[in-house]
């Protein structure tokens, strides 16, 4: 049974989930920054979620999600990605607008409507950005590696975060690189040099900086070393 959560509860749980995956972890100040609220507001919300058993706040260690809190955070991400799919697949919004619009109404959706939407969308496995939609009870979402982590011979499907600079998105589009596109790595130049990719029958070169901003779901490994 899904826990009833408010918009700010869900946003905090998602932010904690993402921050605890980074080296710095989730601390009140960082969380307040991420959420665009004052440290006092963040502290109050953290305390409320701690009392509900969704997270634990320990001095110096920062905020950690409990098992229940992780499930709730993953469920909130699932909901966001399903709503993004609805906007792009059913309403025809471009993939890079889905993120912003989903945030405007996903929290108002009853749980049963979310489930029906998922079925009506034919149970999609990724959001329009190319990131996986977790199962309802998953406690974690596997991270996709950056494109730059691939090696020659690797084949993968591209995912582009919604936060990507629009100029970078435009550049990627000019190379045929957008979410869901399959690429094969032809060459990786040494010393942080560029990647040469096969995209839709053409060789395309992408520098390290851009290749580290997009992510991939790897399909097969064929090391040529
Ligand atoms: Zn997305």
Image (spheres, rainbow, N blue to C red):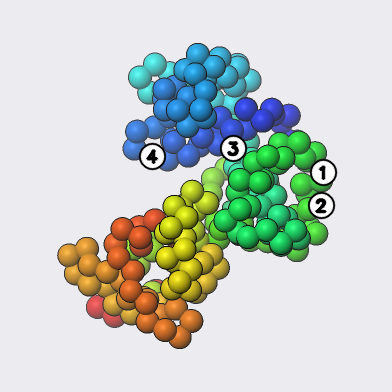
What mark, if any, has residue 26 been given in the picture? Answer: none
Query: Which residue is most to the bottom?
Result: 201
Q: Secondary structure at mark 1?
A: helix
Disc nearer the start of the sequence (3/4): 4
Which residue: 42% across, 59% down? Answer: 168
Q: Which residue has dot 4 on it?
A: 22
Q: Position of residue 91 (x, y in %)?
A: 75, 58
Residue occupying image coordinates x 35% and y 19%: 60
Q: Is residue 82 above or below residue 16?
A: below
Instruction: Locate residue 32, reporting x and y percent.
Output: 47, 24
212 left or right, relative to 123: left
Q: Residue at x 31, y 58 (%)?
A: 209
Give the residue number, with chain letter if any, for mark 3.
73
Q: Position of residue 3 (x, y in %)?
A: 71, 31
Q: Earlier in the sequence, mark 1 or mark 3?
A: 3
Residues packed near mark 2 inside 10 Å, few (<14), some (14 to 19) or many (20 plus): few
Q: CA distance from mark 1 to mark 4?
A: 33 Å
Q: Are marks 1 and 3 in contact (CB under 8 Å)?
A: no
Q: Which residue is mark 2?
A: 116
Instruction: Check contact, mark 2 vs mark 4: CB within 8 A.
Output: no
All told, the count of numbered labels is: 4
Task: Reply above or below: 224 against 70.
Answer: below
Q: Are marks 1 and 2 in contact (CB under 8 Å)?
A: yes
User: Which SS class for mark 3?
Assistant: helix
Viewer-proximal residue among 55 and 83: 83
């Amino acid at each position: 049974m899904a826990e009833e959560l408010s918009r700010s509860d869900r946003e905090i749980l998602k932010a904690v989930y993402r921050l605890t995956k980074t080296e710095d972890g989730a601390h009140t100040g960082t969380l307040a920054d991420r959420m665009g609220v004052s440290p006092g507001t963040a502290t109050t919300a953290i305390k409320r979620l701690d009392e509900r058993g969704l997270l634990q706040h320990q001095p110096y260690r920062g905020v950690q999600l409990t098992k229940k809190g992780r499930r709730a955070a993953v469920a909130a991400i699932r909901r966001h990605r399903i709503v993004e799919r609805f906007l792009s697949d059913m309403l025809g919004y471009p993939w890079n607008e889905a993120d912003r619009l989903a945030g405007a109404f996903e929290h108002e959706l009853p749980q049963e409507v979310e489930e029906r939407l998922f079925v009506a969308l034919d149970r999609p496995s990724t959001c329009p950005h190319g990131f996986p939609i977790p199962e309802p009870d998953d406690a974690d979402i596997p991270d996709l590696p950056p494109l730059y982590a691939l090696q020659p011979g690797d084949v993968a499907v591209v995912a582009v975060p919604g936060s990507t600079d629009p100029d970078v998105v435009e550049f990627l589009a000019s190379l045929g690189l957008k979410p869901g596109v399959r690429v094969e790595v032809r060459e990786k130049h040494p010393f942080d040099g560029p990647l040469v990719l096969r995209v839709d029958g053409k060789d395309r070169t992408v520098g390290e900086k851009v290749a580290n901003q997009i992510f991939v779901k790897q399909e097969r490994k064929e090391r040529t070393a």
